[in-house]
Image (spheres, rainbow, N blue to C red):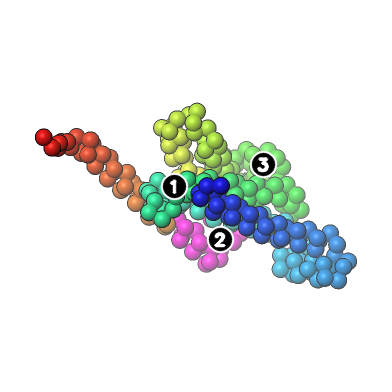
Amino acid sequence: MSESDMPKIIGYSTIGALLGVIGGTIVIGLLLPGLPLLGLISRLFNWLFALDTVQALWYITRAAGIIAYLLLWLSTAWGLAVSSKIFDPLLHRAFTYDMHQFISLVAIGFTILHIVVLFADQYLPFSVPQVLIPFIAPYRPIWVGIGIIGMYLTLLVTVTFYFRRWIGQKTFRVIHLASFLAYAAVTVHGLMAGTDSVLLATQLMYAGSALAIVFLTVYWLVMMLQNKTTAPAVANAPVYRRS
Ligand code: HEM
């Protein structure tokens, strides 16, 4: 096992174990509420997440939406940091690159949860076309439509990780630029479609995360321009040899 594999394996297994424990507790607590301890857990979950109310699934879709948004933000910020070589003095490039890909996949996982729960929701159920075709949703169609476009762009950018060898570095980079649009789309979507956007904490979350992306984008552009101006100068620099 190489050194760069270690943090990946430790990271995956810890996340897997944590999700397993949380998921298992929820499932057991819900399936076997008759047992005293499990009944207590189920009541605790009902009290915490209102699982026994008609809005339960609406709460879950909103929570999954916020987690997906934060992960997509992290993936965008991480990608900009990797391209600007911010991590290079601290972390192995193979690790930072794998991590970027991993965060994008987990973001897609939570987006899928965010969407799938909408089908089962009793409060405001969505049909399959309504989550796949932009602007026909039964709820805030324009803002949900922008979220659907953001989802397609995220999928497009993430899929190209796996075709990089075939499409070439240049095409990969051009397609990757769509991640800016994807991030902008899901930010507008979350802010305008979200029930929680009236809360100050949620507004601060959107403002803070967007500011971080603006800052990292400017830094990335400056680094790119600097590389472009220094690269030809280095290439054209006279080579001094000892005679
Ligand atoms: C097919 C694509 C999508 C559909 C149909 C969809 C649907 C919805 C709906 C109906 C809401 C309103 C829920 C509420 O009242 O808060 C919502 C909110 C939200 N969505 Fe999406 N969404 C999609 C894609 C995405 C994506 C890709 C992300 C992020 C990566 C995302 C993140 C959010 C966030 C953060 C909220 C706000 C939650 C809140 O404030 O409570 N959505 N979405």
**Which one is earlier in the sequence, the residue at label 3 or at label 1?**
1
Q: In front here: 212 or 195?
A: 212
Question: Where does the image place residue 42, in percent across and percent down from the top left?
Answer: 79, 66
Point out the image quarter for the C terminus: top left
Residue 161 vs 86, above or below: the answer is above
* Span of residues in magenta: 187-210
Residue 76 seen by the camera: no
Can you tell me whether the CB of the residue at mark 2 lies under 8 Å from the nearest atom of ligand 1? yes
Asked if residue 154 lies in the magenta stretch, the reply is: no
The kind of residue on which mark 3 rests is: Gln
Residue at the spot of label 2 = 197
Question: Where does the image place residue 48, in percent across and percent down from the top left?
Answer: 71, 68
Residue at the spot of label 1 = 93
The quarter of the displayed image where residue 17 is located = bottom right
Q: Which mark is residue 202?
A: none
Residue 168 vs 213, above or below: the answer is above
Tag 1's secondary structure? helix
Tell me if mark 3 has few (under 14), some (14-19) or many (20+) residues whose alpha carbon lies within 10 angstroms of its own. some
Tell me if mark 2 has few (under 14), some (14-19) or many (20+) residues whose alpha carbon lies within 10 angstroms of its own. some
Q: Residue furthest top?
A: 166
The kind of residue on which mark 1 rests is: Arg
